[in-house]
Image (cartoon, helix red, strand yellow):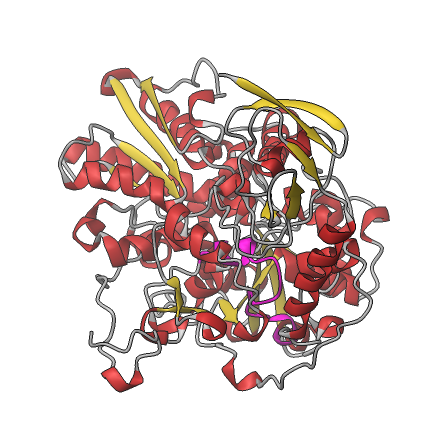
């Protein structure tokens, strides 16, 4: 690759030809503020103009995030003209933004705040308009849209279209009336939105955020008639520490348990318990399909965003999905049956709270299918960010908490359950157990590294005794899922088993995770889960979980049995991609034409 030499603020730097000024400045150790640029996801629209710089020989300032360097270019990032232009842009953005910082969910972690600080904006010389809260869209069970705060960076549009290939959000209208909306300006809850929350992760401000269930959980905790139990997804122990300033990838399992007890939960259980259970059920389901000629390849069903995506865009392939509920929903069903029976508690008095790195889990818990216990399986779902706010609100010194252990009987887990939180983890855990069930022996190596990492689509082949070579695939991010599903639709997929996670990186980067989340942070969080699997947990295979064995002996009786079918398995809905008809005069896209 050819290189060019440029001068930035009197410093020479050598960069690849075609690099942007922003990239060159970063290499030179010079920070240029920006709001719309999101280079990791390939989003550099040059829209916000906060990153403008001077280039010798150019009459106008240029947007550094999109302007390519050339040999001998002289760039100035800190002139009076540049500083004045940036400050003006930020003032204009602030003047069209509700002054609600003190009670905004992104207060203290808002990129617009940070840019205002960087550009030394201390007052806004323009009059603020009146903002009505009536425009806030709360129609989704997972995500709230507050277009009053949108700064038109279009990062949410890019992640929804390019990374997730769902295409719910797009710009509409023109000029000062431009806004980012779903098709026909529908409420987002009436669209094909899969509730993954990646738009929330992309948003630099508080225009998109998770629906908050904190007050409802506080009310349950303070109700003396309720027995409130909590479960935490594998990824929470790898990302909750970031909410308290701890480095990404810090494993905080014991502190997490201690904090939840101090919040007042009656029992602190773990979703990893039912992750191990999922492997037993799903592994046996796969073997049954292989032996009896069932629909193959079988695809995992742990990710609710992925499930809804499949219901909308691949309804003809729903038979390929495992019928297993996700670990979250298995836990809820068992908490109100098995645990209620074991503890002698009326299930109507049990409240199940989930701590998830995922906004789609809020949607999943609300699905009408998820009530096989006779009650709603999971009552409330909190994201990592929400439980972080609760811990702070309670005045708990998280960083200095002593480590504590989970409660029985739904707190034991293996390393296989832990790695569910990283892309490839469900596949790796399943192969460990399927191999053992078929051959009666452990895999020569329990580390199946080909399915690990951030490659969009990963493949592996494992020889499993009399089954021979079993070819598997892993995809994360739904644009990558499309590649796999299109192969299945075209009957070109030669896999036996496929894992799909909606979010890039898997659950460690779900839509409810700490912000920011970058590929480096994804890798660190996943590394923490692999550390828990390989170095902390004595048992690394789901079928070794003694509490799960006891569950089958005393309650479920057998995998895929009658009770397991009733409580742990579900069905899916053919939704299709049709958008409800809207009369032309009600269309909010601003096209002025007919649909």
In the depicted structure, whether residue 561 falls above or below residue 10: below
The quadrant in which residue 170 appears is bottom left
Give the tally of numbered discs. 0
> What are the residue bounds of the magenta stretch?
196-216
Residue 391 position in % (x across, y down): 75, 61
Is residue 495 in view from this perspective? yes
Q: In this view, does 493 lie above or below 308?
A: above
Is-magenta flag for residue 201?
A: yes
Q: Which residue lies furthest to the top in this view?
A: 444
Q: Whole-percent x and y of residue 434? A: 35, 28
Q: Is residue 82 above or below residue 293?
A: below
Please give the name of the residue rendered at 55% of the width and 54% of the height, measured from the top-left corner.
201
Q: Where is residue 259 in the image (x, y as percent from the top left)?
A: 75, 55
The answer to whether one can see residue 267 in this image is no
- Nearer to us in this view, 407 or 578: 578
> Where, by quadrant of the figure, is residue 495 drawn?
top left
Q: Front-most of 254 and 452?
A: 452
Pick the quarter of the image with the C terminus. Answer: bottom left
Residue sitting at 55 percent across and 46 percent down? 38
Q: Which residue is drawn at 29% across and 16% down?
A: 465
**Is residue 198 located in the magenta-colored stretch of the structure?**
yes
Q: Where residue 105 sits: x, y (%)?
A: 67, 67
- Give the answer, above or below, for where 400 lies relative to 519: below
Which sits in the foreground, 122 or 386? 122
């Amino acid at each position: 690759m050819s290189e060019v030499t440029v001068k930035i603020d009197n410093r020479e730097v050598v960069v690849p030809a075609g690099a942007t000024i922003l990239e060159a400045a970063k290499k030179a150790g010079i920070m240029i503020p920006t709001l719309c640029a999101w280079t990791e996801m390939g989003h550099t629209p040059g829209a916000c103009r906060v990153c403008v710089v001077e280039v010798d020989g150019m009459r106008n300032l240029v947007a550094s995030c999109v302007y390519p360097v050339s040999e001998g270019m002289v760039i100035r990032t800190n002139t009076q003209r540049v500083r004045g232009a940036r400050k003006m842009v930020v003032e204009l953005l602030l003047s069209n933004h509700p002054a609600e910082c003190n009670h905004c969910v992104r207060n203290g972690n808002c990129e617009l705040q940070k840019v205002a600080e960087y550009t030394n904006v201390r007052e806004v010389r323009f009059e603020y308009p009146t903002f009505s809260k009536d425009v806030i869209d709360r129609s989704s069970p997972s995500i709230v849209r507050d277009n009053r705060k949108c700064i038109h960076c279009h990062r949410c549009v890019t992640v929804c279209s390019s990374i997730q290939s769902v295409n719910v959000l797009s710009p509409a209208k023109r000029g000062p009336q431009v806004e980012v909306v779903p098709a026909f300006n529908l409420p987002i809850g009436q669209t094909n939105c899969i509730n993954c929350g990646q738009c929330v992760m992309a948003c630099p401000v508080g225009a998109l955020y998770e629906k908050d269930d904190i007050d409802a959980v506080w009310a349950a905790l303070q109700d003396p008639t309720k027995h409130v139990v909590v479960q935490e997804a594998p990824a929470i122990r790898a990302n909750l520490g970031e909410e308290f300033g701890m480095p990404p990838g810090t494993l905080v399992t014991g502190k997490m348990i201690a904090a939840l007890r101090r919040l007042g939960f009656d029992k602190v259980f773990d979703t990893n318990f039912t992750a191990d259970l999922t492997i037993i059920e799903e592994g046996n389901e796969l073997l049954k399909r292989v032996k009896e000629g069932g629909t193959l390849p079988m695809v995992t069903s742990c990710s609710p965003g992925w499930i809804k995506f499949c219901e909308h865009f691949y309804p003809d392939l729903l038979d390929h999905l495992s019928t297993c509920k996700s670990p979250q929903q298995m836990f809820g069903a068992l908490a109100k049956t098995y645990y209620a029976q074991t503890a002698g508690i009326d299930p109507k008095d049990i409240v199940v709270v989930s701590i998830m790195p995922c906004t789609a889990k809020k949607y999943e818990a609300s699905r009408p299918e998820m009530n096989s216990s006779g009650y709603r399986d999971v009552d409330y779902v909190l994201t990592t960010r929400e439980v972080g706010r609760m811990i702070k609100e309670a005045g708990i010194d998280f960083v200095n908490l002593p480590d504590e252990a989970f409660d029985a009987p739904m707190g034991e887990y293996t390393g296989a359950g832990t790695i569910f939180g990283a892309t490839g983890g469900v596949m790796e855990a399943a192969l460990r157990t399927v191999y053992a069930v078929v051959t009666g022996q452990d895999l020569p190596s329990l580390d199946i590294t080909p399915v690990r990492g951030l490659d969009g689509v990963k493949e592996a082949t494992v020889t499993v005794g009399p089954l021979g070579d079993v070819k598997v695939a892993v995809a994360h991010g739904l644009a990558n899922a499309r590649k796999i599903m299109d192969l299945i639709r075209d009957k070109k997929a030669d896999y036996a088993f496929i894992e799909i996670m909606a979010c890039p990186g898997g659950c460690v980067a779900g839509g409810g995770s700490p912000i920011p989340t970058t590929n480096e942070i994804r890798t660190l969080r996943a590394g923490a889960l692999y550390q828990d699997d390989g170095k902390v947990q004595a048992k690394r295979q789901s079928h070794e979980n003694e509490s799960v064995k006891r569950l089958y002996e005393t309650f479920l009786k057998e995998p895929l049995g009658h009770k397991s079918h009733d409580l742990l398995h579900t069905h899916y809905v053919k939704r299709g991609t049709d958008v409800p008809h809207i009369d032309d005069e009600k269309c909010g896209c601003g096209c002025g034409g007919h649909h």
